[in-house]
Amino acid sequence: MADVTSECNIKVLCRFRPLNQSEILRGDQFIPTFQGDDSVNVGGRSYVFDRVFPTNTTQEQVYNACAKQIVKDVLGGYNGTIFAYGQTASGKTHTMEGKLHDPNQMGIIPRIAEDIFNHIFGMDENLEFHIKVSYFEVYMDKIRDLLDVTKTNLAVHEDKNKIPYVKGCTERFVSSPDEVMDVIDEGKNNRHVAVTNMNEHSSRSHSIFLINIKQEHTETEQKLCGKLYLVDLAGSEKVSKTGAAGAVLDEAKNINKSLSALGNVISALAEGTKTHVPYRDSKMTRILQDSLGGNCRTTMFICCSPSSYNDAETKSTLMFGQRAKTIRNTASVNLELTADQWKRKYEKEKEKNKTMKETTQRLEAELNRWRNGHNYI
Amino acid sequence: MDTTLSIPTTGPRLSHTEITNMASTYSHEWRAVCDKFNNAQDLSEVESRKDPENDPFRSKYKARELLREIYCSLKNFDVGENESVNDEADQRPTEQPVDGGMEEGFGRGHCGDSPAGSRAAKLGAVEYYLGVNHVETEELSAGEEHLMNCMTLLEKCSISPENVSLFIQVRNQLGILWAGRDEIEKAQGFLETAEAMYIRYMKEDGQPPMDLTEFFVAEEEALPQQERTKRFEMAYTHTLYYLAQVYKNLEQYEKAGGYCHSTLQRQLEFNQFIPLEWAINAATLSQYYITKTLYMEGRHCLSAASVIAGLAGEVPSEAAAQESEAEAEKRDQLRQKRAEIARCWIKYCLNLLQDAKKLLEDNIGELDMDRQAELRATRLKEEEEKERGRKSAVLFGSSDTFDSICGLEEKVSCVFPVDFEEARAIFLVGQTYVNQAKEYFEMDGHVTDHIEILQDHSALFKALAFFEEDLERRCKMHKRRVDMMEPICKDLNSQYYLLVCRQLQFELAETYYEMMDLKLAVANKQDDLDAHTVKKFNHLCSSSTKFYQMFLDSVRSPEGKWPEKLEDEVLRPALVAKFRVARLHSRLISSSKTVQLENLNRALECYNFVVQYCKDNPEAKSAIETELELSEEMVSLLPLKINRIQANLASSN
């Protein structure tokens, strides 16, 4: 496995889309200036990422640079996650999905689907593959199955032998890239079913496409399991409203308009190692728990508009990306007794030993005297 | 500057009538305006929810068109009738008003409820709605322009019951807008002005002001006073809520906490809350107070949380849940939220015990009698006055919930316990909540949560043990900790729960170590080490060693190789574990010289490891300074002891 670092901070990649027709007509300025392949300047400030893709980057280039490796990792038994983040109409869906059936314009998900099967065809014949996909969305802390709209409130289940998984969600076995595409099409159509406020819904829900790859060696019976989560996060201008993925994504400095998000503010104040903070969006957090720490390969795409008109939103998206780079799993072992206390305890013991040693020596001396036949009587 | 409100204290005050009168000559047109406004509201609030994904703002755009038409009609209405006002409205100042001074808007220009003032307010209201509309359709710059137009129009008016709501709400919107652009101070300016305006209005006038929507309704549709109050207070609740966020973003956490508290208080007061949501928020706020060691406030929040959560109704039975999906969801929600509140209570009890322990312990972590006496004295002195003073400021509850909240508060203390009896009372409350929380957060389904609760339970025992003077009993408390953690530690798949496993291993190792210490202390008192005690002591030593070793093994690569360089998160724990394994080996009791020799050699090996690691990785030194110092000492001393035993062994052979 190439290039697997032991550390697990998140790879953050930034992509700018070109100005669109109406922006050009309106006479909007093109604001970013690209410096090297890892930094971009907006409004006099420089933002550095693992990679920055200027507007002329092709879908294939993006895929090869960032997502290809993850396919290999997942086939090697690791879990991977690819996020897309950005304001509405900044190119998130273009990056993740693109034009699903167009070889040049298709995005990461269809390319991954093809790549997985290409890899499989080139692998040991004794390996048996089972590939399952699921598609669901998280909205207001409820998980809705996009492949079976009757399942509207699925639970996240965790047991002692597995990482958290969505219990009872539909799993489709797939055996070709086309079948993967069919599932995506089906799920996308279902996003519209039985939704009362489509507008709010699509900007506040996160959709998650899960590819589960199990391989078994028919002779050695060795098994390997890998999961790949492809996550389309709610529009960035709305993320703070939903408090997506718990504390991690809730850092934007936006003001939440709705009082229903009062909890997010209070949670932010209450965080700390000593406290218990009930998660608002606990389900999203639990599903992605493994991706934000532990045994993960995580990539986040930050999608931006280049127009001066979206200046403020672009800046805040870029800031978010910078923060995402610093995410690390901070959970670690509790060490309670301080070193100082240890030392003092130890010294106290040493002191005690010293007096005990003296007593022993005295007693030994006395004993020796007895042995040597002294008689005090 | 003259800052008094220029509202007449007598005479007709409802300018609403005037608006209608004013437009009476255009009554037909006026009705059309009102209809348009209603349409726009409906499009914006109701229709827009059904807009298709590929045209998400269709209804908002339609609403925007209507608002623009209203704006034009309004401007045409008064031409001729009130030329001068019209001119003023057209000549927008090149400099836009920016909030900063609190006196803004008071006693300026024309009277708030004069015809000119009314007209400005009405135009301002349309600008306001246009501004909000643009912001909602993600055209922030245009939105800002409209909102600032509204500000400019209002700037010429003094505050009146007709326009005060607009004064506040336009600032709320501008606050949101600027915060979204990361210009928090600017947002703060607008919101703080809104706050000052509310306070001032309530002090100087206070009658229920007109709602924004009332600018464009027929007279007979004016809102009742009660509804006016509700809407106005709600707007101000939002101001406070936005300020809470602004202060949070400015890292002024104490202020932010206060504003969150006020927001919660007002939600209760004006009966605008969802019980479970409110309860979780109050419970979470208690956790903020805990971090500030404000236990009285924390307890108040928790008691209110428990009582208000009770308003959400009974938990549907399992049978009922199986019959209907709605009941199943309700059951899950209620059980989950109540378990969450229980977990907040656990933390309350735990932190109260732990903070008291910190105050009472001496430099080796034992109960210090002098400090105990001291704390008892200061506590008596401060307790009453302080509690009364702080309490009046933060009270939650309506007349019917207040007694239950107080009743719940009385069940647990909010002052630091000074002795075992007091500590035990707090411990028992904590333990009750542990059992409550575990009912929902079961192992199967909620592994991480379940274990966190167990760890808290263990920590409760540990804190209580500090207050226990009887060493045997103290030892038994630690035994309880071992009993709850050991089976789980063995059961858990360490591949997926690596971090949790490590935490459990380390804690078990430390608990056994503690028990070993206590056994030794007991034995020392008794002055004789019988075979049984020695056996027990050795067993505790090896158990502790075993778990440290498990922890250390978890750091190895899958192939069993020890890493050349330890990662930051495990650096200190791993070296401490090595150090303690060394200590444990040197303490094992054996009558056999060969075994003694073996143990000492093993101890030396571990001490050497710590010393050598720090030699190879000098940057590790600072993480483990004290242990390193002791290890170096032992590395120089132990060989002497080993030699002596070896010599002894050789001579006796």
Image (cartoon, coloured by chain):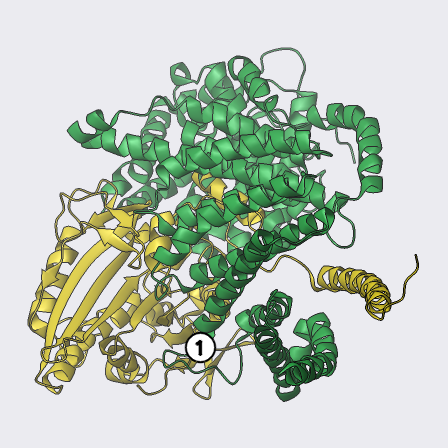
Given the image, on which type of amino acid does mark 1 rest? Arg
B569 displayed left or right of B95 = left
Q: Residue at x 41, y 74 (%)?
A: A12
What chain does mark 1 sit on? B
Position of the N terminus of chain B by quadrant: top right
Give the vertical position of A163 relative to B574 (above or below). above
B235 displayed left or right of B325 = right
Query: A337 or A148: nearer the eye?
Result: A337
Spot the residue most to the right.
Answer: A376
Give the vertical position of A294 relative to A281 (above or below). below
Residue A2, by quadrant, is: bottom left
Query: B564 or B475: nearer the eye?
Result: B475
**Count of picture labels:** 1
Q: Secondary structure at mark 1?
A: loop
Q: Residue at x 42, y 20 (%)?
A: B24
Q: Which chain is green?
A: B
Q: x, y percentage for residue A313? A: 45, 62
Q: x, y percentage for residue B43? A: 29, 38
Q: Residue at x 49, y 65 (%)?
A: B546
- For chain A, the rendered hue is yellow
Residue B74 shows in the view = no
Query: A332 or A10: nearer the eye?
Result: A332
Position of the C terminus of chain B by quadrant: bottom right
Q: Residues within 10 Å of mark 1 (few under 14, many from 20)?
A: some
Q: x, y percentage for residue B368? A: 79, 44
Query: A363 or A256: nearer the eye?
Result: A363
Give the vertical position of A254 relative to A31 (above or below). above
Residue B392 shows in the view = yes
Which residue is denoted by mark 1 in the rendering?
B556
B486 displayed left or right of A148 = right
